[in-house]
Every structure is written in structure tokens, then in C-alpha cells.
């Protein structure tokens, strides 16, 4: 006679063990998955009037909204593209314009000036999550510019989370997901 591989477990014991696990955010995970699926569906069925104003392969496309003061001083065209949903990753096209900004701050018209980076998120997450995500976005840009030569002491990053968010659909939420780059004091 062979012994069973698993010990006998009563159905009540199974329920008592499984209940706390099931109650630990399963709805949140399903909601996040649904949001990501909806975002993917929206992105794949976008019409031309729902895309960001500049094409993604534009040399000035960036996940950073650069202040007019920096754009003028550095001779950069106005960028207007944003971070993806639930992301703080810079895309290759983001780095080209950031390289121009670093050059401007390290040896150009803004040499010696400080830079302020403020991360933002769309309103779809909780406030703590959005503050953390906004900070991650600002820190990603700060890391990139300091790795390229910007003085770390002259680079300040902070987050506003979704406090300034105005979006109500995917195109407007995309504008909420950004880092604002401004001259520091």
C-alpha cells in the first residue's frame, strides 16, 4: 500500500488558509490588469487626433516638459510626449533632447545654473503610489542628466503625484504623466 503524497487536509482548513491570501489585494491586481489591458487597447486603436501632438520619432520628443525659459536659452524645439502608463523609464528618443539640455547646463548659456525636476502622475492610482511614481520619474531624469555631466548638487527632484492631474481619458492622462524641467533658484 502506498502513502498519499499530500497529507489529508480538511476543507475548513483550506478555506481558513486561503481566505487571507485572497483578501490581500486580489481586486487591486485585477483592476490594475484591467487598466493595463484598457490602456493597451486604447493605444492600439488610437486615431490620429488622439496621438500626442508630435510624432514619437521626433528628435525633440521627450517624457519631460521643458520650461519655455530653458527651451529658449538652449535653442531646443518644444517637446511634447510623455511617460507610458505605470512607467518611469526613459525612451531612447527622450535622451536626445536631455543630452541637449545637459550640454546647455554644463557648457552653454545655462552653465552654472540649477535645474528643478518635478514628477507627475495621472490620477488612476492611489495618492501614495502616484507620489512615489512621480518621484521615480523625476529621479530617472535626474539620474540621466547627472550621469551625462550635470552637477548633482545643482539638480533637485521632487514629486507632485497626481495633484495637478487634469486628465479624464488616455490622451489627457498621457499629458499628466511627465516630468517638468525648470530652472532652479
Image (tube, rainbow, N blue to C red):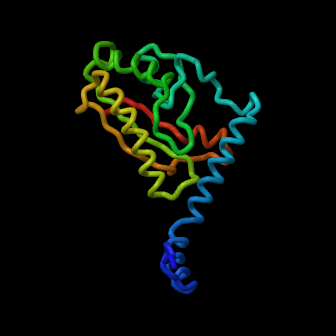
Q: Choose between 145 and 11: the one closer to the eye.
A: 11
Residue 118 seen in this snapshot: yes
The answer to which quarter of the image holds residue 85 is top right
User: Which residue: 64% across, 29% down?
Assistant: 52
Give the residue at the far left of this rendering: 153
* Residue for point 60% across, 46% down: 166
Residue visible at 57% across and 29% down?
A: 81
Between residue 145 and residue 185, name the one nearer to us: 145
Q: Is residue 20 visible?
A: no
Q: How many marks?
A: 0
Above or below, 105 against 28 in this view is above
Q: Position of residue 110 (x, y in %)?
A: 32, 19
Quadrant, the C terminus: top left
Give the image quarter of residue 139.
top left
Position of 65 relative to 42 (above/below):
above
Q: Find residue 172 and report its horizontal and vertical position in percent.
A: 64, 41
Horizontally, is 126 left or right of 144 in the view? Answer: right
Amino acid at each position: 500500500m502506498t502513502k498519499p503524497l499530500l497529507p489529508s487536509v480538511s476543507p475548513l482548513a483550506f478555506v481558513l488558509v486561503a481566505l487571507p491570501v485572497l483578501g490581500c489585494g486580489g481586486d487591486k491586481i485585477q483592476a490594475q490588469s484591467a487598466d493595463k489591458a484598457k490602456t493597451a487597447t486604447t493605444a492600439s486603436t488610437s486615431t490620429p487626433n488622439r496621438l500626442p501632438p508630435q510624432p514619437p520619432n521626433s528628435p525633440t520628443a521627450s517624457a519631460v516638459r521643458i520650461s519655455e525659459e530653458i527651451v529658449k536659452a538652449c535653442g531646443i524645439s518644444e517637446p511634447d510626449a510623455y511617460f507610458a502608463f505605470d512607467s518611469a523609464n526613459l525612451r531612447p528618443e527622450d535622451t536626445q533632447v536631455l543630452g541637449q539640455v545637459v550640454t546647455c547646463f554644463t557648457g552653454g548659456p545655462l552653465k552654472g545654473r540649477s535645474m528643478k525636476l518635478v514628477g507627475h502622475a495621472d490620477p488612476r492610482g492611489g495618492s501614495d503610489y502616484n507620489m512615489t511614481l512621480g518621484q521615480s520619474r523625476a529621479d530617472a531624469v535626474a539620474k540621466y542628466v547627472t550621469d551625462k555631466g550635470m552637477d548633482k548638487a545643482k539638480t533637485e527632484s521632487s514629486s507632485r503625484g497626481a495633484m495637478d492631474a487634469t486628465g479624464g481619458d488616455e490622451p489627457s492622462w498621457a499629458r499628466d504623466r511627465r516630468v517638468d524641467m525648470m530652472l532652479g533658484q
